[in-house]
Image: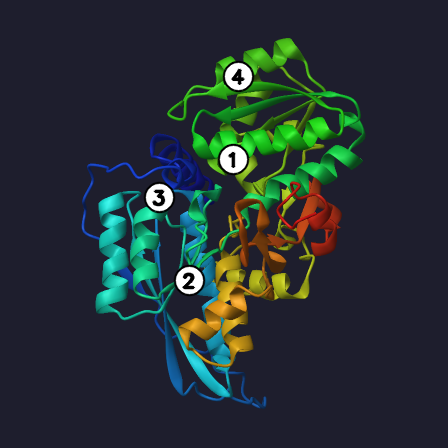
Amino acid sequence: MKKLLVLGLLIVSMLALPLMVACGGEEETETTAAPTETTAAPTETTAAPAGTETTAAPAAAETLKIGAVVWTGWPLGYDMKRGVEIMAMLDNEAGGIDIGGTKYKVEFTFIESNNDQATTMSGINKLIYEDKVKYIVTDTMYPGAVFAETEKNAIISLTGCPIPTMFDPTYKYTFQGGTMMQATPEVAGWIAKNVPELKNGTVDLAFPDEAGGIGYAMGVKATLEAYGIKVTEIKYPVTSTDFSAIGTQVKADNPSAFIAVGNSAMDALIYQAVVQAGYDGLLFSTTTVTYDTLKTAVPEEALEGFVGGAWPVEFDPAATEVAQVFKDKWIEVNGKWEGPEIQLTAAYAALRAALEKAGTTDVDAVAEVLASGLTFEGPTGKGEMIPRLDLGISRTVDNISEFCVKKIQGGVPTLLHMITLEEGKSYLAPGILGQ
């Protein structure tokens, strides 16, 4: 069932407009379906076996409303929704979030965006004007329109967007909630420095011909070339569904390694095309595309030796205690671990930490905490808010995260290294931190 679901999402992801395209522009789309809404209901606790003693968590005294407008038609949005639901469930089962000594039960309202600008804005307006939320964590598809409305209404928006167009020095309430931007230099830098096959080698780099894909790819290329690696670009139309030509070129080039830089669904199919063409060199990735996602398209034997980014939850056991608690709850709720794409759960982890540190639900106080170098932890590992001095922004509006590096060995993701926050900073592009 999992494979059928993932394959379905792969097809939808390729045919629909990717997040990275949407983050790069403000085009109106034709679809104007009414937004659908789901509100996470309080969970029921299972009674303990007879004869055991239990201590009930204190009931939350208040309710904290959080909104999200997500596109569940692709893996990142679909799994973001499920991931933050798990995190909120864990918090509620523990009695709620402690904010200034008061326990708050988390109530999430999710609205389907349908990957459409009009539907997205309708959902944002509903959250602001009808549901009266003050906090939004989302995979925001149309940043300009969304942020104009959230900023005007003093709504904190922690959003996942892969390109710097989301940042504006005048914004006070808008923050990068995903870890997309800094994943590339952190993981690419470590792999380039430490994987023997890449030392003074060559790499074929495939990426979609649109703003987000180009931005990702150029970041990867610059990082690899800084370590003396020669990179050949392979650009493809963002609407592509047939990647055989990429496979043919990679086979002919026979580089030391091959990497695809797009979204996880499309990348898996590109790796599949490269393997089917007969290329047997190193496959690697700087993103956190999971082994479960890859093997829905690529034969497992061809993935042996694959090197790439990973979250702590991908390993068994998970690489951190927080990640293991999340993974255990996921399995309890969903029946099994499915290799979900959870990077946007970092947005909820950052918001929760900011509320706890502020000790109040006052939006300005919470925004100030986020803008002052907050550290936090969730299933994606430890994170830290950072400035974008390269964009003239000294407030901490972006973030970096711990990243694991995995290698597929014996059909199992094996931890090669965990990039710490301090180590990760050393791989960032010059100017971001003023270095």
Q: Nearer the viewer, residue 401 or 386?
A: 386
Q: Nearer the viewer, mark 1 or mark 2?
A: 2
> Which label number is shown at residue 42?
none
The crowd level at tag 4 (other Cα within 10 Å; few <14, some 14-19, many 20+) is: many
Rendered view: 105 above or below 395: below
Local secondary structure at mark 1:
loop
Q: Nearer the viewer, mark 1 or mark 3?
A: 3
Disc 4/disc 2 C-alpha distance (Å) = 42 Å
* The quadrant where residue 165 appears: top left
Disc 1/disc 3 C-alpha distance (Å) = 17 Å
The residue beneath circle 3 is 73
Q: Earlier in the sequence, mark 4 or mark 2?
A: 2
The residue beneath circle 2 is 173
The residue beneath circle 1 is 296
Rendered view: 325 above or below 415: below
> Which label number is shown at residue 246?
4
| Badge 1 vs badge 3, beta-carbon distance below 8 Å | no
Disc 3/disc 2 C-alpha distance (Å) = 27 Å
Type of amino acid at the residue the image marks with label 4: Ile
Type of amino acid at the residue the image marks with label 2: Tyr
Would residue 263 appear left or right of 416 to someone viewing this image? Answer: left
